[in-house]
Amino acid sequence: MITITAMKWAPPFAAGSVRDHRARWILNEVGWPYRVRLVDAPTMSSAQYRTQQPFGQVPVMEEDGRPALFESGAIVLDVATRSGRLLPADANQRSEAVMWVIAALNSIEPFLMNLAEVEFFIPDETEKRLRRPAVLAAAKKRLGELQDALGGRQWLVGDSFTVGDLMMSSVLKIASSLEVLEGFPALAAYQARCFDRPAYRKAIDDQCATIAQHRMEDMRYEEAHHG
Ligand SMILES: N[C@@H](CCC(=O)N[C@@H](CS)C(=O)NCC(=O)O)C(=O)O
């Protein structure tokens, strides 16, 4: 049986966006049952957890007889490859779908994360004001280029939803939480198309239900830093 790790609690703005939703989503898509191991801050910073996830993050996918896998992209590709689902049958299109997973993580996500960091994690208003225009412009440039690449198509590769779409729409959540996606109607419509899937909705409902059942105290941050 597969187990994935997920955070016990996250701040309300992050509920539905914590990256374990990517592992939940692909597993729901292919119909493989899985358990969820909830982790708190001391667990994530423990030496034992870091043998599985060197950076102390979620998700990790654990399975008897296999190495634990970290990196949401690696987990999504592993499940898609082994199940033969959400990857086109045509070899060239399969390569393109993998390419879009990497593009989402490598060419789009860092730009959106730069913006998220300015918005959510810089407490000093003056510094925020100074840094925001440049990171916003860089993020918008990438989103515009992505929108152009998608053109009038429904999906990034071929004529059906693939792992490339799963990862790209998930990465675009960062832009929608920052209300930047509104300036890119074709991308917003594309994301809505990707999210209109039972496997996605279950992933998000399950993650949000877990987070709602816990409180910040359950993460035991103090113990992780001083314990
Ligand atoms: N590149 C990693 C990023 C994972 C990641 O950033 N996870 C966040 C939750 S969304 C986390 O565990 N944050 C806690 C921390 O970094 O201490 C992946 O895609 O799996």
Image (cartoon, rainbow, N blue to C red):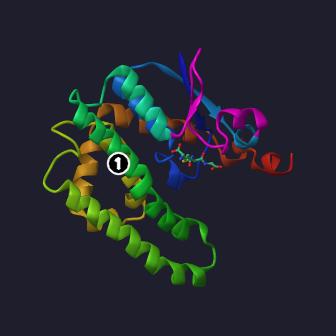
- Residue 87 found in image quarter: top left
Specify whether 178 is left or right of 190.
Answer: right
Q: Position of residue 105 (x, y in %)?
A: 43, 50
Q: Position of residue 97 (x, y in %)?
A: 29, 40
Q: Residues within 10 Å of mark 1 (few under 14, many from 20)?
A: many
Q: Position of residue 75 (x, y in %)?
A: 48, 33
Q: Nearer the viewer, residue 61 or 74?
A: 74
Q: Which residue is mark 1?
A: 168
Is residue 34 inside the magenta stretch?
Answer: no
Residue at the far front: name it: 92
Q: Nearer the viewer, residue 147 or 7?
A: 147
Residue at the far left: name it: 152
Mark 1 and ligand 1: say if the CB distance to the nearest ligand atom is below 8 Å: no
Looking at the rendering, the stretch of residues picked out in magenta corresponds to 46-71
Above-or-below relation of 224 to 131: above
Q: Position of residue 113 (x, y in %)?
A: 49, 61
Write the residue at 63% across / 78% down. 124
